[in-house]
Image (tube, rainbow, N blue to C red):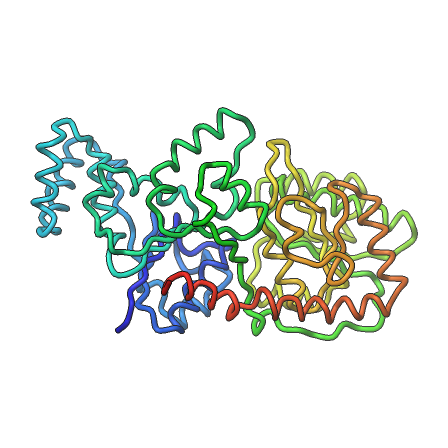
Amino acid sequence: MTKRITFVVNSFPTFSETFIVNHIVSCIKEGFDVRIVAKVVNDIDNSSQKSLIAQYSLMEKVYQLSDCYRLNRFDQSKWLFFSLLSNLRYLIVAANIFFSRKKYKLKKWQKFLDALLIFQGDIVHIHFADNGSDYFIPSIYQHLNSSIKTVTTFHGYDAHFTNESKLLYLREKYFHLLDKVDVITVNSEYLRSRVAALGATLSKVSVVPIPVDVGVFNFKKKPEFYEPIKLLSVGRLERIKGHLFGIKVVHQLITRGYQVKYKIIGEGSERVQLMNLIHEYDLSYNIELLGNSTQETIVDELHNSFVMLFTSTKDENKRMEAFGLASVEAQSTGTPVIAFNTGGVSDTLNSGTTGILVEDKNIDEMTNSIIELLNDSDKYKQMCVAARVLVEEKFDVNVIKDQYLNIYHD
């Protein structure tokens, strides 16, 4: 019998959350009847995976949550009335809620009706915990189908706290979710420790890395020589991604007499600051900010790159990368990664074998690591092959699919 799984996300599709599309597609291939529920539904052009989304007709599987918040009180009441009429089998439950809580707010009604849309079928998988915390409060959850298996995946920012006050806030926010949800998944040991601090029962928490399709991010043998040295970074142009350090590394390499071309794929609020730094160092010839790109373009750039610079760092708010998908994607193509050792990045590579971890924000160490590989072609070639093997064995979409299937069927 076909099982139905509902994926809950904030917005769909997006450029940065390719792993969600890959996860959904892997479930379709396994025969699941898939639904996608999103607060915001974007046009298909808002994705680097347009061909994949079209191939599996994912836009036809998307349902948008209600938008009651923006209505005035009269329109809210009208919306509520017609929403309940369209869900006749829940009228009795709704009446019970109403008469037991005379001052039940319309915002709660909206959450209740959203929950009815979500909690259907056999499995509900919530990506990013803050997309599901409201549905587990007792006044809503007690009226839902408790036989549905629930899975929540934390991805990083949803478990971030910088002080005791924020920690207490998140503990309260996620209290009911962490109590009621059947399984919690995280993408690294680092994130597992963060979620444990929020109050999660560790026996519920499984580490399931973000997968990569090794068929898309295919291996390609590197050329014997790089002149100029081609470097690549992929990630949003935000402080936590640390692209300014990549620019400084290029400046050091050029100062030492190396010819370098450095491309950064991604878009974000730091573009102006990064452009200013590029002009300050007079590196306009050497560095390109390519903006958002398709997966095909990213793969081509990785094939042509000597190494990936994974410069994610601890930012001013003490945030760190929970995992580092771009690191895994690079290694899948046979491109070694030189990365700052922060957050969960160490889970994505074997330092010294498939890439090199260096101290956070240590420009000299990152620069020297590039030069080390330039001067040791045998080590570099071995690293390229080992990187691909690591991804095939640990991060391939089929390996991760089996881990999720075990969770769904357990």
Q: Is residue 6 left or right of residue 243?
A: left
- Which quarter of the rendered picture does the N terminus lie within? bottom left
Q: Is residue 236 left or right of residue 17?
A: right
Q: Quadrant of residue 59?
A: bottom left
Residue 133: x %, y % from top left: 35, 41
Tell me what residue is drawn at x 50 percent, y 51 percent. 186
In this rendered view, identify the residue nearer to me: 127 or 269: 127
User: Extreme right residue here?
Assistant: 257
Tell me what residue is drawn at x 51 percent, y 61 percent. 48
Residue 158: x %, y % from top left: 47, 41
Residue 181: x %, y % from top left: 35, 48
Q: Quadrant of residue 242?
A: top right
In this rendered view, identify the residue nearer to me: 69 or 347: 347
In this rendered view, identify the residue nearer to me: 95 or 51: 95
Note whether 330 is above or below 64 in the view shown.
below
Q: Is residue 274 left or right of residue 151?
A: right
Note whether 379 is above or below 314 in the view shown.
below
Give the tally of numbered discs: 0
Tell me what residue is drawn at x 39 percent, y 37 percent. 174
- Which quarter of the rendered picture does the C terminus lie within? bottom left
Note whether 28 is above or below 16 in the view shown.
below
Q: Is residue 55 left or right of residue 392?
A: left
Residue 188: x %, y % from top left: 57, 51
User: Extreme top residue here?
Assistant: 165
Tell me what residue is drawn at x 66 percent, y 62 percent. 330
